[in-house]
Amino acid sequence: MVFIILVLLLGGSQSQGCQPYGVRLFLGHYFSYLRNSQDLIRVVFNTEKECKDQFILELVDNKLGHKLMISQITFYDTQLLNMTQIYEKNETTHFTYETFIHTFKVGLNNIDLNASTSYNYNIISQQKQILSGPHKFDIPWAESEQKMIVFGDMDSNWVKNYSKDTFDWLENQVKADKRYDTVLFTGDMAYDLESKNCQQGDNWLRNLSVFTSRYPFMAAPGNHDWGNNTYFDFFRANFGSLFLKEYNTQHYLNDFFSFDVGMVHFIQFNPIKAVYQNDIHNITPLIVEQMRNDLIQAHYNREKVPWIIVYTHYPIYCSVPKNDQCINNFKYLSEFEDMFVEFKVDLYLSGHVHTYQRNKPYYKNTTAKYIQKDNIISQYQYPVQIIEGAGGTDYGEQNSTYPDSPFMEIQNPNHGVGIITVKNSTHLYFEHITVADNKVIDSIWLDRSSDATKTTTRDGFEVAMWVIFSVLIVITGVSIYYKSNQGRKLKSKLLEETVTMVVT
């Protein structure tokens, strides 16, 4: 009898150790410049024990009802995050935390986008027992309008319930089966991810799956995400997005990635060393170079992907009194500002300040040229800047209203999220919603239909050809006129002059 009880207890312990938690979706490298067709959507989750090769991803086509089983036929990986080992030589920080991170990559060898872009999924055991689910994901599709949620600066401690209203709003979106192509998170999770022997971050993983199991979660790292050794170990292991490993160096952990969702090119970058003025290894030029190379390619591809949106944790213009970054970020990030103007970036999204704030198009600490009629903004020479830092946190002041500034259009300190809706190649709609009452308290349209800068390389070539063609017609007409009036001798002379004109 004692033996049977021990077996049951050990079996239950093993089962509990292999229970998936923190289920979250990410967009794969199919959406980056790599265009990896076997990496569309990543399904990621954690377990307390290794449990390697014990899981199967079950997909159900929501259009045709076909059931697919994915295990070893697609990419599946288990990685250990051992925070104890990471800090074993650290004299001031000691952890006893480890977790195992499992990743399924869903690719075109598993699904048929022409048949369906919507799938239910379950994480099941080898014995076909459902361990987590049913969940659902939609693969972003360029043929329809795109919708994204954006917010940041949120914890899940719920000591004072400052973030619970945002969690509740997101959970209601999932229950109502609202479709969003991705969640853009502007940084600062859990406050902090490595606090309390990483239990703060572990609780965050367990709680956020309410919405990350439904919507791909594309996060920008914040200053509260970088950990005790400033290497973002917990963040990168659990939320690493489309980083390109070949760019990594010992001190530069690829603080940059980009991806396309339908008609939008998104760029995430992390200028933490620039804004805190501690770039002792001169990392910022690497990010500047990567940003420029990316923007060149994005601008070249603008006929297919017309919108460019940059998001990060750090605002360029904010209004917190006596705050060094709010005063000087336009200087610290000036190289990036110049590129945003050069390549016609449309939106700049950030967090860091615990409020919602929309700024006018601003450049080099002064108003940039733009036209606004009602809530429609057009012919802007610099991106509209929006701070989405009102996700709700126990850390710092709550519901703060900051002094008005020349660049500020509107602010609202109540907890809320932003929603981006890309209607077509010329019209984008942004709205900010306060989550407690689900009310839209601010909205704008970006209108690119009259943007004179949209001329593409092809357009320029066609214009040049028409100019050359017109000049040749004029020359030919003049030649014919002189030919009819001055005879062969004059004709010969005129042809020589014509050749000279054409060459010139």
Image: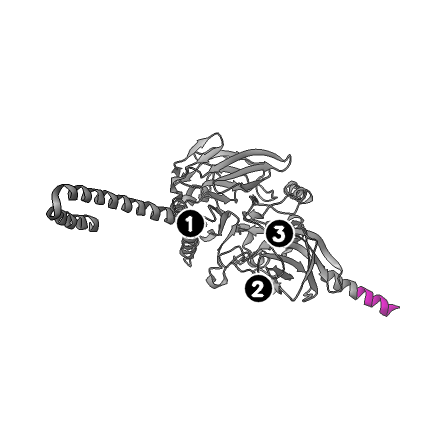
User: Is label 1 in a helix, a strand or a loop?
Assistant: helix
User: Is label 2 in a helix, a strand or a loop?
Assistant: helix
Give the farthest residue toward the right.
1
Amino acid of disc 3:
Thr
Whether pointer 3 and pointer 2 mark residues with C-beta atoms closer than 8 Å, the reply is: no
Q: Residues within 10 Å of mark 3 (few under 14, many from 20)?
A: some
Closer to us: mark 1 or mark 2? Answer: 1
Q: Can residue 249 be seen at all in this image of the molecule? A: no
Q: Tell me the tag on residue 86.
A: 2
Whether pointer 1 and pointer 3 mark residues with C-beta atoms closer than 8 Å, the reply is: no
- CA distance separating discs 1 and 3: 28 Å
Range drawn in magenta: 1-9
Closer to us: mark 1 or mark 3? Answer: 3
Q: Nearer the viewer, residue 266 or 69?
A: 69
Residue carrying label 3: 117
User: Whole-percent x and y of residue 193?
Assistant: 60, 53
Residue 45 appears left or right of 13? left
Q: Nearer the viewer, residue 259 or 409?
A: 259
Residue 96 appears left or right of 492? right
Residue carrying label 1: 299
Asked whether 342 falls inside the magenta stretch, the response is no
User: Whole-percent x and y of residue 412?
Assistant: 55, 35
Give the farthest residue toward the bottom.
3
User: Whole-percent x and y of residue 362?
Assistant: 41, 39
Q: Is residue 105 above or below residue 217?
A: below
Amino acid of disc 1:
His
